Image (cartoon, rainbow, N blue to C red):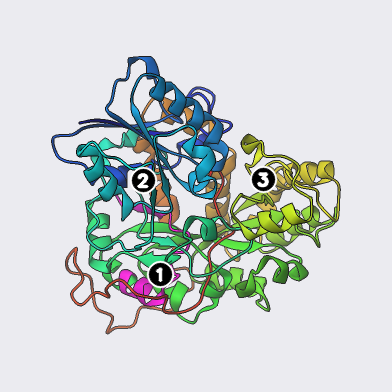
């Protein structure tokens, strides 16, 4: 069987020659995971439009699989229609398809609602028998027995962070603006791999640097602690996403830092505490954001702070106040978003009932455009303020000001190096990606990350067990329920 698996280009990346660098950060792990369920004699191609051209006219597969995000919906539908015209069976899944399956079904022969670990193998068996169904709905949530990700299909040299990995699904909490509740409806909204399986996948990855793309790596703290125990002795450096209450959990971020954690994406979301209850961001209520940054920095962990503009209690002053707070705390990098009511979320339902949704042009549901009517400012003020926040935070003078909050010169220089490379060297990164020499630059990234570790953190307890094999003896199995209540970041990171 000939199979083509496609990640369509997002709004700003219709050509690999026009894309921003951020679209070449991570390979399409979701599709590579599904590819693991195919037979050894199946011919499969994995195509990512963000980094390579796709010639539909010359492609003649038996099956096309398209992963669809909100802002790639228009392009995904174009591709699906083109393949169907040529007689190819088209299957579509992903966040947008799950939220609007009837609309997607007008362009596909088969649609998948929810995650595909349980439905994808069933579909493959049906397809080989010549009886594929038009819709498969996920109800059984488990990563137990999942085959290894087909990393052989990923062209590592095309990505800035080829060593990305996902060891869990979803989040145990229910923030109003997050896509997760729509995607995981009908079953568990958070579940993990077995720790031994996660460690085995990590061992397969070359080099030292890892980037965990999980919505909330620490959502099950028992799993997280077992995973970190298994990482001990591997010499890995890694980045992940967490929540403010995770960082404040006694000993957790310190344990992570001792086994290589160097940067956390943290969903602060808003400097206006009155916004939090309305968005059901309960885990942020009553916490000290200053203490979160201090705890992470004391452990030698950088902060990538996520903020969302346009909540109902935000006024025109929110942009300057947010940037000012982040710079004063010495936050290394910041990610700003405009509040976006994704279809299927509680936010979308509420704004629809209030008559505040302006349109369904999915290209503009990208966290950079105001697609609803704000309460505390105009649409123009919201969009202009969003762009100004990025501009003001990443000025060289602002980068130096944030770096100057660090107590010693070496830490200031590392801050300058990392933050400058993150936003100021896009042309250089783009050249490395285009010339497929990005892997040669990864040791520089690893060296910078390595310099952030262990500045002021407590030494590791002497009786902590060292990692000795890819499979941790006695590792925790997959949890039936989250062990402790935490919550995910703001939802999709940029481009999802």
Mark 3 to mark 2 CA distance (whole Å): 30 Å
Mark 1 to mark 2 CA distance (whole Å): 24 Å
Mark 1 to mark 3 CA distance (whole Å): 28 Å
Residue 462 appears in the figure: yes
Residue 50, x across and y down, in percent: 46, 31
Residue 411, x across and y down, in percent: 54, 59
Residue 306, x across and y down, in percent: 62, 57
208 within the magenta span: yes
Helix, strand or loop at label 1? It is helix
Q: Closer to the camera, 90 or 43? A: 90
The residue at 66%/71% (across/down) is: 290
**Which residue is tagged 2?**
29
Helix, strand or loop at label 2? It is helix
Q: Is residue 469 left or right of residue 270?
A: left
Disc marking residue 256: 1
Q: Earlier in the sequence, mark 3 or mark 2?
A: 2
Q: Are marks 3 and 2 in contact (CB under 8 Å)?
A: no
Q: Earlier in the sequence, mark 1 or mark 3?
A: 1
**Which residue is tagged 3?**
394
Q: Residue furthest left?
A: 41
The residue at 55%/68% (across/down) is: 243
Magenta stretch in the rendered image: 207-227
Q: Closer to the camera, 58 or 130? A: 130
Q: Quadrant of the N terminus?
A: top left
């Amino acid at each position: 069987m000939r199979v083509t698996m496609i990640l369509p280009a997002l709004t700003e990346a219709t050509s690999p020659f026009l894309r921003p660098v951020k679209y070449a950060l991570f390979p399409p792990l979701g599709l590579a995971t599904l590819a693991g369920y195919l037979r050894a004699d199946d011919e499969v191609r994995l195509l990512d439009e963000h980094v390579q051209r796709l010639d539909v006219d010359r492609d003649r597969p038996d099956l096309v699989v398209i992963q669809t995000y909100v802002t790639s919906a228009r392009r995904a539908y174009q591709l699906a229609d083109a393949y169907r015209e040529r007689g190819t069976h088209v299957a579509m899944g992903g966040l947008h398809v799950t939220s609007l399956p009837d609309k997607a079904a007008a362009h596909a022969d088969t649609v998948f609602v929810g995650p595909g670990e349980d439905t994808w193998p069933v579909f493959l068996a049906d397809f080989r028998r010549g009886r594929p169904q038009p819709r498969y709905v996920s109800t059984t949530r488990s990563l137990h027995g999942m085959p290894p990700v087909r990393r052989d299909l990923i062209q590592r040299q095309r990505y800035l962070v080829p060593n990305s990995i996902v060891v869990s699904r979803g989040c145990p909490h229910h923030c109003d603006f997050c896509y997760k509740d729509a995607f995981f409806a009908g079953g568990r909204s958070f579940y993990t791999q077995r720790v031994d399986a996660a460690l085995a996948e990590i061992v397969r990855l070359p080099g030292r640097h890892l980037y965990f793309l999980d919505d909330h790596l620490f959502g099950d703290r028992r799993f997280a602690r077992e995973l970190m125990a298994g990482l001990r002795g591997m010499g890995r450096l890694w980045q992940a996403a967490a929540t403010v209450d995770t960082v404040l959990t006694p000993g957790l971020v310190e344990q992570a830092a001792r086994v290589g954690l160097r940067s956390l994406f943290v969903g602060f979301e808003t400097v206006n505490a009155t916004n939090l209850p309305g968005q059901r961001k309960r885990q942020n209520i009553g916490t000290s954001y200053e203490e979160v940054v201090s705890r992470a920095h004391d452990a030698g962990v950088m902060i990538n702070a996520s903020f969302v503009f346009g909540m109902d209690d935000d006024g025109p002053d929110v942009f300057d106040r947010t940037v000012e707070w982040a710079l004063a705390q010495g936050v290394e990098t910041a990610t700003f978003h405009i509040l976006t009511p994704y279809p299927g979320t509680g936010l979308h339902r509420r704004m629809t009932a209030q008559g505040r949704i302006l349109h369904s042009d999915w290209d503009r549901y990208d966290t950079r455009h105001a697609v609803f009517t704000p309460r505390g400012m105009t649409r123009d003020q919201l969009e202009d303020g969003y762009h100004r926040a990025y501009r003001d935070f990443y000025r060289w003078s602002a980068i130096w000001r944030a770096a100057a909050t660090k107590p010693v010169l070496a830490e200031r220089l590392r801050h300058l190096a990392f933050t400058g490379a993150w936003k100021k060297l896009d042309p250089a990164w783009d050249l490395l990606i285009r010339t497929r020499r990005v892997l040669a630059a990864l040791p520089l990234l690893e060296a910078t990350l390595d310099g952030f570790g262990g500045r002021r953190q407590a030494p590791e307890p002497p009786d902590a067990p060292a990692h000795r094999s890819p499979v941790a003896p006695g590792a925790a199995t997959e949890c039936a329920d989250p062990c402790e209540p935490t919550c995910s970041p703001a939802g999709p990171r940029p481009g999802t």
